[in-house]
Amino acid sequence: MEKTIFIDKVEKYDIGGSTKDLKKAEYIFALHGMSFEQILSQCPKSTKTPGGAFISGRFIILYNLSWSLDRVLVALINHKVDLDKYFDAFADSLSPQTVQAFHDLKEIIRQTDESELNDIRVSDNDDDFKIAYKNYIDFMKSVK
């Protein structure tokens, strides 16, 4: 089943994109069975900026959050991207640890069946996001 990941800015040439929108970040994590609470609870309290990375189709999703959630950044980077060439597009989301995580996850993706890599669509359409987010909130209310 194809998933749509909504972001603020889609980069050209299918290299990825990013968002700083709290609701879009929440939606991205929910699509992957995660929540802010779960992410923060698994992070040591001594961590200055909680962050991490995971795979979603052909993309590696990198994120960092503030503990208060007043600042969030989620970046999607196509696993085929040359980070040196497109570094400026993702510089805000890349720490030395996330660069290493990107390369580690890139190796995992290279071993994945190609058909599994194309189940993610990236969109910056805010009207579609409003509908998807409302449906997500309605669904969450129904399961509580």
Image (cartoon, rainbow, N blue to C red):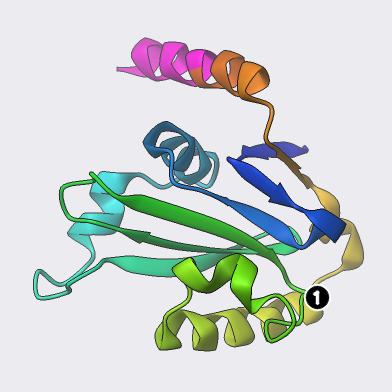
Task: Please tell me which residue is depicted at 80% across the width and 75% down the height of the picture.
Answer: 80
Q: Main secondary structure of the magenta part?
A: helix
x and y, in percent, of residue 13 in the image: 86, 59
Quarter of the rendering occupied by the C terminus: top left
Q: Is residue 43 magenta?
A: no
Q: In the rendered image, which quarter is residue 17 located in?
A: bottom right
Which type of secondary structure does the marked residue at label 1 adopt?
loop
Binning the other alpha carbons within 10 Å of mark 1 as few (below 14), some (14 to 19) or many (20 upward) gives: some
Q: Which residues are magenta?
A: 134-144
Quarter of the rendering occupied by the N terminus: top right
x and y, in percent, of residue 110 in the image: 79, 80
x and y, in percent, of residue 77 in the image: 67, 65
Q: In the rendered image, which quarter is residue 42 located in?
A: bottom left
Q: Nearer the viewer, residue 117 or 19?
A: 19
Q: Is residue 115 above or below residue 9?
A: below
Task: Count the marks.
Answer: 1
116 vs 96, left or right, is: right
Q: In the rendered image, which quarter is residue 3 located in?
A: top right
- Which residue corresponds to mark 1? 80
x and y, in percent, of residue 111 in the image: 79, 81
Q: Is residue 29 above or below residue 78?
A: above
Amino acid on which the number 1 mark rests in the picture: Lys
104 vs 11, left or right, is: left
Task: Please tell me which residue is depicted at 23% across the width and 44% down the height of the picture.
Answer: 70
Task: Please tell me which residue is depicted at 17% across the width and 55% down the height of the picture.
Answer: 67
